[in-house]
Amino acid sequence: MKRRSLWALLAGIALVAAGMLPGGYVAGAEQALLRVGFSQMEMTNPWRIAETISIRQSAEARGIDLTIMDADSDAKQQVLDCLTLIEAPVDYLILAPRLSYGYEEVFDAAAKAGIPVILVDRETSGKAGIDYASCITADFEWEGRTCAKILAEASKGKPCNVIELTGTPGSSVARSRSAGFMEELAKHPNMSIALSASGDFVRTTAQETMESILQNNEVDFQAIFAHDDDTGIGAIQALKKAGLVPGKDVLVVSVAGQKDALKAIIAGELLASVECNPRLGEYAFGVIDAIEKGENYQERIIYNGRVYDSTNAEENYERAF
């Protein structure tokens, strides 16, 4: 349900106190640029890079002064980055939280400064309209359920033990994708989780994890559910190194929709990639536009992607990131 958040009021008070009017204008002066800070958790994979590019392009299109800080996969550093941006100060803070907890200090500081916070791509503890203005995220449980359905259809009722290579431990996305996958898996008696291990959304980490599993001959498995494409591709590399044929000996499904994944689908190595679009710039700045104009906006924006498989990977290659 759309409604005007408490953040609109707080932001308005802060603008009046600074002599600014909605729309980025300073009373009795030339137009001033809005200042927006973006705290990115890391820049270690194509998804994060594509998201950052999208945020930057949306800011540039509006003539907004954007400052980007990269926490380098460190949640504590990300909190410090956010506090630095708030103290700068910025007018808005866009935050891609690494973990689903631990940002209370950021929310408190932003509220005291009258700076609206917009969460992108992941959730964290707090309440929309109070701790942050809006949260923009994919339906991660839907992504997990969809991956399970794809593997269930491909396994054709035969026994299918699945290795789950999860994302960052403690992240909302890893938890939700796993929950969605398990929910659907329960509907298929032929399928079960043989082992869950972290790939941390990093290709090399996932490859090392999968190599260890294969070398130790820990479990018997026929499929891999990777929480993102980089993880899936890392697993595929480990399978090939061990002399197995991805797509034949082991079915692999992943989430994201990046170009490398579509290449793997076309090569017959990846069964499918469930899209999780990283292009969130227009969503985030749409919320900022609405707050600036004093208009209603959504405090929770959920979007879904499409499924890429052998039937459409080639034609959709340029859509991928």
Image (cartoon, rainbow, N blue to C red):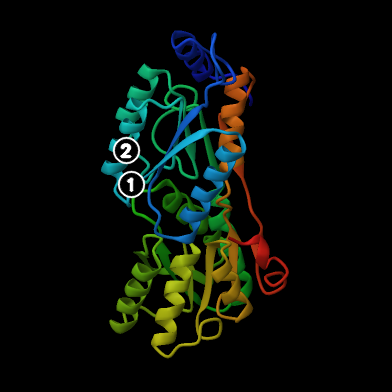
Q: Position of residue 279 (x, y in %)?
A: 58, 49
Residue assigned mark 1? 71
Residue 219 in sight in this render: yes
**Quadrant including the C terminus:** bottom right
Residue receiving disc 2: 81
Provide the secondary structure element on which disc 2 rests: helix
In the picture shown, does residue 133 fall above or below 54?
Answer: above
Q: Is residue 17 left or right of residue 158?
A: left
- Taking depth in this image into account, of 312 and 78 the one nearest to the observer is 78
Residue type beneath disc 1: Ala
Q: Quadrant of the N terminus?
A: top right
Q: Which residue is located at x 26 percent, y 42 percent?
A: 76
Residue 248 in the image: state x and y as whole percent.
Answer: 55, 85
Q: How many circles with numbers are drawn on the protein?
A: 2
Residue lying at 34% horizontally and 38% vertically, measured from the top left = 101
Q: Distance between the Cα atoms at labels 2 and 1?
A: 7 Å
The answer to which of marks 2 and 1 sits earlier in the sequence is 1
The percent coordinates of residue 39 (x first, y second) are: 40, 40
Dividing the picture into quadrants, the one containing residue 24 is top right
Residue 117 occupies quadrant:
top left
In this rendering, is residue 21 above or below 147?
above
Marks 2 and 1 in Cβ contact (< 8 Å): yes
